[in-house]
Amino acid sequence: MNFVRICHRFRPAATQNIQFFNRRDLLDRRQCSSNAAPPGLPRAQPVDRSQESRPVSYGQPMPSTHPHLLQDGELVTGVGLAEIQTRRRTLFELVRKYAKDNLKRDAKEHLIIIPSASKKYMSDKIPYVFRQNSDFLYLSGCLEPDSVLTLELDADGNEHCALFVRPKDSHAELWDGPRTGVELAPEVFGVDRAANVADLKAHLSRYAFAHPGATLWFDEKSCNLDDVRRVVAHIDKGDSVCSPTGLVHKLRVIKSPSEIALMRQTCQIASEAINRTMGSSQPGQSEHQLFAKVDYHCRMAGASYLAYPPVVAGGSNATVIHYINNTQIVRDGEMVLMDAGCEYGGYTSDITRTWPINGNFSEPQRVLYQVLEQVQKELLNCLHNEDGETLDQLFDTMCAKIGKYLQEVGLIPRSLKGLDLSRAAYKFCPHHVSHYLGMDVHDTPLISRSIPLTAGMVCTVEPGIYINRWRKDVPEEFRGLGLRIEDDVLIGSDRKIEVLTEGCVKNLQQIEARVGSSNS
């Protein structure tokens, strides 16, 4: 018998479910609601006490396995199960209200389908680090791929939450790590029932047959689980499907106290990482080395990873707004623009600083930096006021202010006024001044930037000035200069704001003192 045959002889079947549990309270389920399970949904099987001697294994960090990451009572870093269950109940309330106000037919039955993300592969069988779909994570607390959350609202107003997950599989777990599995999922994630994700099609088919008038909530565009898209297409009648994403974003745009605490932490980590990177900067370093330094300092302070591919742009590369090649040497006399943030506990920071690599601003660099510093200071003061009650109003204010100050330094003709002046300024800063921030860098994109800012929102304030090398309408000494200053801001009540990234150095004199001040 050769080696291959021996391996196949002793290899467990792929469908074999190996369950690990020993906790006495598994049958005392923490329910999403007090209602009975909907017809057709498999009930969780009783615990097999013969397995009690085997250790419990989960598909994600838990307080018992990762006490350095989670406190007792937390399902994910900084957030408890009760808060996640509250999010689901609030979504049900939004669905009821939306149906009453916007659906013409008598819509009382609803089925909401929220899929997880899937694994992405860098090359054959080599996956990227997995990052969960933010909406799914927000509503489930589950960090595992290939899972689906379903939320059902029946005609009597009863709410049912189910989670379809991958079952325990000893062979798969040998390669990819442990899974929480069907048996433990109801207790861990606080849902009414759990089932094998392979049973999703059968369950949805039964549901569609039993509830022909139900409204289906599913966002095909945001779903990257091909099997789930096919299953939903199988039951989709075409005239009763709504996207739940806008309602979920309506919830996510207002941060809870626990989310605010996480936002403070991720902003603090990124602020200090950029400070330390600035402190060790010197001419002749590559953009890639600066990238590596900020990445290192973020991870060493507890961040999971950078929140997005950072912009580390030296010299004229800074005039390319989304420059992420990070391959050039930053030479003496040039500035470096760094746009970087990190992810901590599923929440992101987003900061931009610009500094001279040798620690001394040249006169043209100094002039533009002082303009930008003043503009950003005034924009922060505008938040909650009539010139900054919405992010779109803040953008209009930015254009007017950049136009005014660039006129004063002679880069825009003094004859321009009003809309013409703003249009001229837009050529120097052709991007919006702000976006929402949270679990994603460009968070809750379905929330309009024209709605009033509300307590609990977090947004960026990021004016910039970019003058490429080929412009002929500005003096030569300003050509090839790119600058941006970006901070993350928590909107409070009573016209108060909190700059979450206040700890990241940005005052011109402080920057000159910081650059090159350490070797870390």
Image: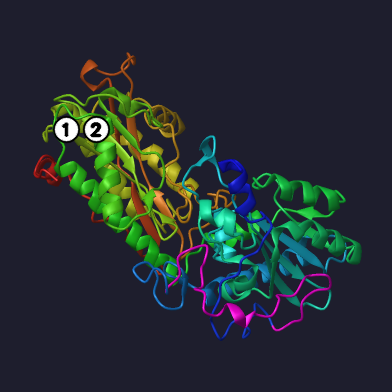
- Front residue (pair 214, 55): 55
Identify the residue at horizontal 34%, vertical 26% (top origin).
319
Q: Position of residue 84 (x, y in %)?
A: 55, 71
Identify the residue at horizontal 30%, vertical 42% (top origin).
485
Q: Which residue is mark 2?
A: 336
- Range of the magenta residues? 34-63
| Image side of residue 12 versus residue 178, left or right | right
Q: Residues within 10 Å of mark 2 (few under 14, many from 20)?
A: many
Q: Which residue is mark 1?
A: 357
- Front residue (pair 514, 406): 514
Q: Position of residue 266 (x, y in %)?
A: 35, 57
- Front residue (pair 520, 165): 165
Identify the residue at horizontal 43%, vertical 71% (top origin).
257
Q: Amino acid under label 1?
A: Ile
Q: Main secondary structure of the magenta part?
A: loop
Above/below status of 50 relative to 335: below
Q: Residues within 10 Å of mark 1 (few under 14, many from 20)?
A: many
Q: Position of residue 14 (x, y in %)?
A: 66, 54
State which quarter of the image contains the N terminus. Answer: top right
Q: Are marks 2 and 1 in contact (CB under 8 Å)?
A: yes
Res. 187 image quadrant: bottom right
